[in-house]
Amino acid sequence: MSILLFLRLPIVGNMDSGTESHTQQTRAGGEWLISLGAHLRTCRRGGNGSCSAVGYRRAGTAAEGCRILRWLFVTFVAAVLAGWQLAPASTPTPEPGVRLVWVGVEDAERFVLVDLDAREVIEGYNTPSGPHNVTVAEDGTAAGTLYRGTELAIVRDGELTFVELGDTPHDVKATGDLFVVANEMAERLDLVTLDGEHITSIPLRGQPHDTAIAPDGMTAWVTLNHTGELAIVDLDAHEVVDYVPTGQSPHNILFGPDGRFWVTDWRGLVHAFSAEGELLETMPVGKEAHHLAFTPEGGEVWVTDHHTREAIVIDTATYEVLARLGIPGSPHHVNFTPDGELAAVADHTNGTLVVFDVATREKVATIEVGPGPHGVWAVSADAARKS
C-alpha cells in the first residue's frame, strides 16, 4: 500500500491539467524525492526533533518518527527506481475489438452483443419474447424477430425499440435503410426503416420462412413453407416479380459473394442456384440442413445440421464437403467475422456460442450467452468502429 501511495503522490498534484507527460511526472517525483531526503537529513542531525516538516507527525518520540520516515524513504526510493527501470515512456491504448456478433437468445428472451475476442457478452437487452432470427445493417443497427410474439426488436445507438407487426415475424434481413421481415403466418413481407417506421406490407401466396437480399440490394428472394417455391420480390415497387418452383423443401436461403444463391432443405439437402434461379447442384449433406453462411471471400459455405449436430464445410467451387465439425448440442445459425478468421455457431441446447478458427477448423472458444440461442449475425468492421 505504501509503495502505491508514494508512486502516486508526485502525479496527483497535476492531474487537473490532464497533459502531464511521463517525463514530467518522473521529474516531479525526483524533486519530491530530493525534498524528502533533505528532511530526512534534518532528522538525522536532530533538526526540530519531530519530522513535522513533511507532515508525518505521529504519536511517540521524535526518534520513532524519524525511524518511520527513514523506512518510508527507503520504500519510496525502491519504488521509484523500479518505476524508472520498468515503466515504458508511454502505454499504448488497446484498440477496441471489432469481432462482435449479435445473438438472439430465445429462451432467455434477450438480445445480446458478444465480443468474440473478450469471449463475453458486452451488451444485453430484454425483450417481451425470445428473438429468433437476427441481422445487422451497415450502420450497426441490429434487429431481431420476436417469433413467439408479434414484434420486431431494433437496437439503434444503444436504444431498444419495438415495432408491432402482428402475426409471427420469423426472419429479418437488412438492405440500405430497410429491414425486410418475413412475417410467416401473415403470408407477407413487412418493410421497416432502421429507425422503426413500418412502411408497407407485401402479400405473398405462401408462408415466408427465410429471406435473402440479392446483390442489387432491392430484390428479396424468399423461401415459402409447404409450397416448394421461392418468391422473388421487388422491394422498390413493393410487389412480387415471380415465383420459382424448386421441387424441393426450401428452408434457409442466402446469396454468396459471386451472386449464386444457396438454399438448405428440410430433408438434409443443400441446393446451389445461379443468380437467375437455375438449379446448379444438389448436395445430400445431412439429415436436416438448417442454416448457412459464406466466408467473406466466398470460397466456403458452412451449413449447420440439427440432427447430425455438425457444422458442415462445403467448397463452393467444387460442391465438395471439406469437413464436418462436431457441435455438442443443437447447432442453429452460423456467421463469420468480417476478417474471415472466426466462425460463431449458436448451440441452442447448451446456451453457448461455439467459435471456430476458420483456417484450421479447430474450436477455439465456447462462450455462454444464455439458454436457447438461435440467430447469429456478425457486425461489419465499419459498424463495429462506429459503435
Image (cartoon, grey):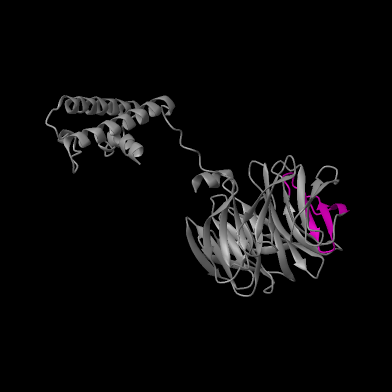
- Left or right position of 203 against 127: right
Q: Residue at x 14, y 27 (%)?
A: 46
Give the x, y percent position of residue 122.
52, 53
Q: Nearer the viewer, residue 362 or 175?
A: 362
Q: Nearer the viewer, residue 200 or 24?
A: 24
- Left or right position of 355 against 70: right
Q: Residue at x 13, y 28 (%)?
A: 47
Q: Nearer the viewer, residue 298 or 217?
A: 298
Give the x, y percent position of residue 252.
75, 60
Q: Is residue 189 shown above or below 291?
A: below
| Residue 268 on the magenta span | yes
Quadrant of the rendered image containing residue 105: bottom right
Give the x, y percent position of residue 367.
63, 53
Give the x, y percent position of residue 349.
70, 63
Number of marks drawn:
0
Quadrant of the rendered image containing residue 133: bottom right
- Left or right position of 5 against 124: left
On the question of residue 286 being in view, the answer is yes
Q: Which residues are magenta?
A: 256-283
Q: Is residue 18 shown above or below 142?
A: above
| Residue 272 on the magenta span | yes
On the question of residue 213 being in view, the answer is no
- Left or right position of 107 against 331: left
- Residue at the left extreme of this rendering: 48
Q: Is residue 314 shown above or below 331?
A: above
Quadrant of the rendered image containing residue 300: top right
Where is the N terminus found, in terms of image quarters?
A: top left
Q: Is residue 225 shown above or below 217?
A: below
